[in-house]
Amino acid sequence: MKIGVSSASLYPLHAEDAFRELAARGIKTAELFANSTSEAKDPVISMISDTIQENGMNITSFHPFSSPMESVFLFSTYDRRIEEMLDMYSGFFDSMNRLGAKIFVLHGAILSSKCSPEHYVKQFRLLSEIGREHGVTVAQENVSYCLSGDLEFLKMMKRELGDHARFVLDLKQTRRSHADVFDYVRELGENIIHLHISDGDGDKDCLPVGHGGFDFRRLMREMSEIGYDGAYIVELYRENYDTFDRLRESVDRLEEIAATL
């Protein structure tokens, strides 16, 4: 079982510095959150590559800062904007290959967009096909302020996209959608290929593992039952924990739970 941390958790550190902090804490699995286009190309990619090679780390996934742009670029009907985003994301896919990252995390169109389900499916398939040409899997994340925050929308994607339907399940986003994580697990099943992990309680929807009341043992058990072999990536907001050591502690706690299954 791969358990790690997203560099997003260390925002606003620069990506290369975030990876050095993760490496210093012995974290071996990570997701790269690129906070700018410069963090998806040299020299930053080379610095991150050096860090992961020197410390025996692996990068499972890539999450771009450009998610808020996807509504008016990728999911618009304006050809030049669509082409620009496809070009930019193709460049990101190339950088992912250099780092060994295989999963590209997509937020998609926001709730207020005028993107129809039919157009959404068409554009997602288009990006997914380009990703596959680069050896990358594009995966839709559930995001509360996006169309993807609705489980029914994700179920529609699963029906319409066939083997292009791949999902990232984010626990804090299900809480923000006032939804049950285990409904997503049951309905999306083996199409879930990546997890963003956080704990939560009645007051806060994003906490280090063990600081809330979420049943991680049940999650691991149910994910195992559907054949999940992806990563458990801790993704916290910086204001929801004190020191970076909480990230290591979250990984340790997840590993302890996994060992008891």
Image (cartoon, rainbow, N blue to C red):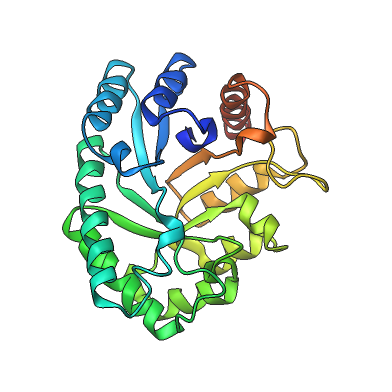
Left or right position of 260 against 226: right
Residue at horizontal 48 percent and vertical 81 percent from the top? 114
Position in image of residue 75 (x %, y %) = 38, 73
Residue at horizontal 25 percent and vertical 55 percent from the top? 88
Left or right position of 63 against 87: right
Position in image of residue 1 (x %, y %) = 46, 36
Q: Quadrant of the C terminus?
A: top right
Position in image of residue 183 (x %, y %) = 64, 65
Say how many tags the image has. Answer: 0
Q: Quadrant of residue 38?
A: top left
Residue at horizontal 36 percent and vertical 45 percent from the top? 62
Relative height, residue 24 to residue 45 (above, below): above
Position in image of residue 52 (x %, y %) = 31, 24
Furthest residue toward right: 202
Left or right position of 117 against 80: right
Left or right position of 255 against 75: right
Nearest the viewer among 116 and 82 is 82
Furthest residue toward left: 133
Residue at horizontal 33 percent and vertical 31 percent from the top? 58
Residue 1 visible at all? no
Residue 136 visible at all? yes
